[in-house]
């Protein structure tokens, strides 16, 4: 019975999705909002590297948090597919594809965070470089992570826009959450394109441009945790689509 409930109830998926989203947000705030702000000094490679050397345990903890986020996001991807599939199977698949690309690039970006520590270690092969060169290598890895992460967020921004539209059209999730998520996606696109191609403009709009993104994602997370989905409407929508497809879904039996 429990296995059947997990398979068929959208409310179970909603709660799991809310927990996963909460973990992603919490770990993101810790890794980017606390660790990075504490250790990374904008425009000063030497100071940044000295901070990382002096707080290696904190840096490694931040890297672990950064790696856990895409792991949770894979599970959240399945949840979003299940919850939004009744609205439009084609659009939700498009969102999935955008998200898969985003997660793939994000996972690769974490490689650079791990690579930051290698030039700062005591390996024999590193003795071929002088200290300033080693600091430059470590800082280059750090900047490479930022570039890769911005690219990942561009694809994620597209995911947010599509998912926001699906939520708006669903009628079993609040339209306001859909609108906020679409705004979040648009802000990600603006912020990341600016960071990559117009750094001066990004400095002007940051961090304010990311506040709507935080609000949009947090609203979706909290709604999944507190309210979940309107199950009768979700099943009605799912049954309607299934009838058009010529079969009766298992959810109609419950």
Image: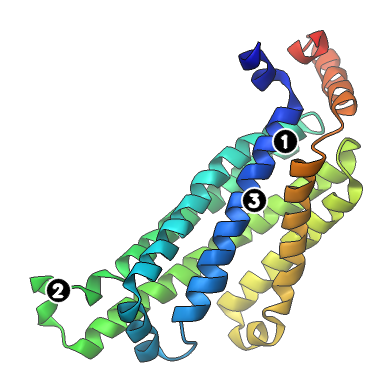
Between 208 and 53, the one lying in front of the other is 53
Q: Which residue is drawn at 49% across and 56% down?
A: 106
Instruction: Work out whether mark 3 precedes mark 2 in sequence or the reverse, and give the earlier one.
Output: 3
Spot occupied by residue 216 in the image (x, y as percentages of width and height): 77, 58
Whether 198 is drawn above or below 252: the answer is below
- First of labels 1, 3 by sequence position: 1
Task: Decide if residue 231 is on the left or right side of residue 94.
Answer: right
Q: In this view, does 237 lie above or below 66?
A: above
Q: Residue 183: name its quadrant.
A: bottom right
Q: From the viewer's side, name the closer residue of 16 and 126.
A: 16
* Circles 1, 3 touching at the beta carbon (< 8 Å): no
Crowding near the residue tagged with mark 1, few <14, some 14–19, many ≥20 C-alpha atoms within 10 Å: many
How are the residues colored?
Answer: rainbow
Q: Position of residue 253 (x, y in %)?
A: 80, 8
Q: Is residue 178 left or right of residue 150?
A: right
- Marked residue nearer the N-terminal end (1 or 2): 1
Q: In this view, does 96 lie above or below 146?
A: above
Q: List x then y, in percent, for residue 158.
A: 69, 54
Who's the residue at 30% across and 79% down the image? 53
Q: Give the secondary structure at mark 3.
A: helix
- Residue position marked by numbered label 1 in the rendering: 14
Q: Please name the residue that numbered disc 2 is placed on.
A: 122
Determine the CA span between mark 3 and mark 2: 38 Å
């Amino acid at each position: 019975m429990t296995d059947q409930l997990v398979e068929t109830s959208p409310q179970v998926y909603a709660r799991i999705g809310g927990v996963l989203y909460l973990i992603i947000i919490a770990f993101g705030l810790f890794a980017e909002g606390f660790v990075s702000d504490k250790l990374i000094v904008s425009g000063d490679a030497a100071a940044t590297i000295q901070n990382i050397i002096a707080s290696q345990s904190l840096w490694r903890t931040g890297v672990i948090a950064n790696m856990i986020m895409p792991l949770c996001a894979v599970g959240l991807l399945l949840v979003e597919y299940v919850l939004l599939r009744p609205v439009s199977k084609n659009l939700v698949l498009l969102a999935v594809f955008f998200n898969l690309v985003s997660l793939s690039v994000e996972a690769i970006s974490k490689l650079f965070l791990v690579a930051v520590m290698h030039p700062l270690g005591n390996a024999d092969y590193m003795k071929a470089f002088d200290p300033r060169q080693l600091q430059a290598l470590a800082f280059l890895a750090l900047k490479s992570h930022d570039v890769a992460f911005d690219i990942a967020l561009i694809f994620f921004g597209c995911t947010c826009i599509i998912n926001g539209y699906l939520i708006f059209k669903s009628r079993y999730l609040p339209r306001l959450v859909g609108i906020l998520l679409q705004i979040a996606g648009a802000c990600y696109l603006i912020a990341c394109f600016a960071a990559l191609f117009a750094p001066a403009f990004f400095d002007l709009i940051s961090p304010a441009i990311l506040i709507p993104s935080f609000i949009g994602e947090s609203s979706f997370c909290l709604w999944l945790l507190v309210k979940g989905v309107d199950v009768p409407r979700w099943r009605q929508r799912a049954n309607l689509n299934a009838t058009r497809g010529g079969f009766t879904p298992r959810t109609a039996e419950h």
